[in-house]
Amino acid sequence: MILRILIVTAVAAEADSVARGLPSGGPGSGEIPLPGGFTLHRHTGTIPRPGTAPLPGAVPPAGAVRPARALSAEPASGVGFGPDTGQAPGPAPAPGNGPDTRQAPGPAPAPGNGPDTRQVTGPAPAPGNGPDTGQATDGTPAPLAPPEARPGGARSGMPAQTQVRPVVDVVFDVLTGGVGPAAAAVATATALAHAAAPGPSAPAQSHAPTPEPSAPAQSHGDTAALGGSGGRLPYDLVVSAGIGGGFQPLAPLGSVVVADAIVSADLGAQTPGGYLTVEELGFGRSVHPVDGALTRRISAALTRGEQAHTVAPVLTVSTVTGTAERAAELAGRHPGAAAEAMEGFGVAEAAAAHGVPVVEIRAVSNAVGPRDRGAWRIGEALDSLRRTFQLLSHTVFVEPAP
């Protein structure tokens, strides 16, 4: 399967921090021009699908997503011993001397048809000879761990079985949309419309080194989603991301706020009786709720990665708060809000118009209140932003919504 994520930031520094947490170098990675002078920065990779049982030696470290290429099937354990993790790359051993490192033959499934379940073909080894030692069909042994790394070790006399790790081809497009809700809405809508429009999509202009001819990168799905020149494919999720102000003490500097609601803080009217939201005026909406299952998965991943965070509403403002009085006004009008920024509601409006789920993620660079540039922690916030996307890019963002 293929999942496509659009990540929208306001400025290049935010986009760069997000990009440093994402996979890079996969097929189709590079720059894609959009109408209106916008540019998508595409990152692609193939990763194990979350929820599948870990296979020793096969789970990438945090943030490490291997470039999309042909899969290798990994033999499962026989009865009575741990999972087989194969052996290190190198010449194929003689029959009976090591695990099966052959690669799964045949074409990948069409996009949308579920996880790739191709498996090794061929006879199992004769009893007593140990695991099969066939080589990958492309002549390249799978990069697996040596036999001694297996729990329980290898044993003879056990029939070889096959276990397959489902995978996901993932595409992350990072877009710098500009400052403020209007600019963010225009940029997001442009990218979403371009992705959904029929017709060919310009191939990504890659700046990555050309792969060696002996090991061409391959995709398991539609090459258009990975930057090819085929048809365009719509996005599965939109993320508004960047740094912002945190309401104290809910969101300390350097922490992250995951929005459970994206709120236009001042889309309404002042009246003698107080502020009225646009909903109360009967003119539209000022809140986009975020899917609870998605925010829970994001929160769980950040907790596992020990990234301090809060799940709470994020306010969108057109003027950054600079006084204690304004901070108190916003906190009173929107109880429980943990952060303010300037683009989330615009991104959410565009996503809603295209029927795509949306979430906002903000790393806190300053306290909402009196403007004190000396107290800002922009570098720390940008690093938290990078770490957040490193934690999420190989877990939450590739897990289909239940």
Image (tube, grey):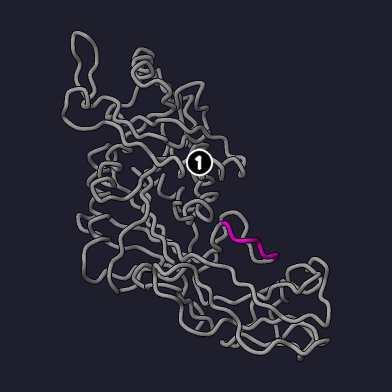
Instruction: Please say if 253 is above or below 154.
Output: above
Please give the name of the residue rendered at 69% of the width and 73% of the height, measured from the top-left corner: 76
Magenta-span inclusion, residue 55: yes
Judged left or right of residue 222, residue 23 is right
Pick the front one: 393 or 297: 297
Callout 1 amino acid = Arg
- Could you tell me how many numbered marks the image carries? 1
Q: Tell me where residue 195 sits by quadrant.
A: bottom left
Q: Tell me where residue 98 sits by quadrant.
A: bottom right
Judged left or right of residue 301, residue 321 is left
Secondary structure beneath dot 1 equals helix
Judged left or right of residue 109, residue 146 is right
**Outermost residue, front direction?**
79
Q: Badge 1: few (under 14), some or many (20 or more) residues near its Cα, within 10 Å?
A: some
Residue 351 % position (x, y):
29, 47
Magenta-span inclusion, residue 174: no
Point out the image quarter for the N terminus.
bottom left
Judged left or right of residue 376, residue 71 is right
Pick the front one: 128 or 372: 128
Predominant SS of the magenta segment: loop
Instruction: Please say if 398 is above or below 339.
Output: below
Q: Which residue is mark 1?
A: 296
Residue 289 % position (x, y):
35, 36
Instruction: Please say if 169 is above or below 314.
Output: below
* Numbered range of the magenta stretch: 51-56
Residue 279 % position (x, y):
22, 27
Please give the name of the residue rendered at 36% of the width and 49% of the height, measured from the top-left corner: 238
Pick the front one: 115 or 87: 115
Please give the name of the residue rendered at 56% of the width and 63% of the height, measured from the top-left corner: 48
Please give the name of the residue rendered at 50% of the width and 41% of the height, measured from the top-left corner: 296
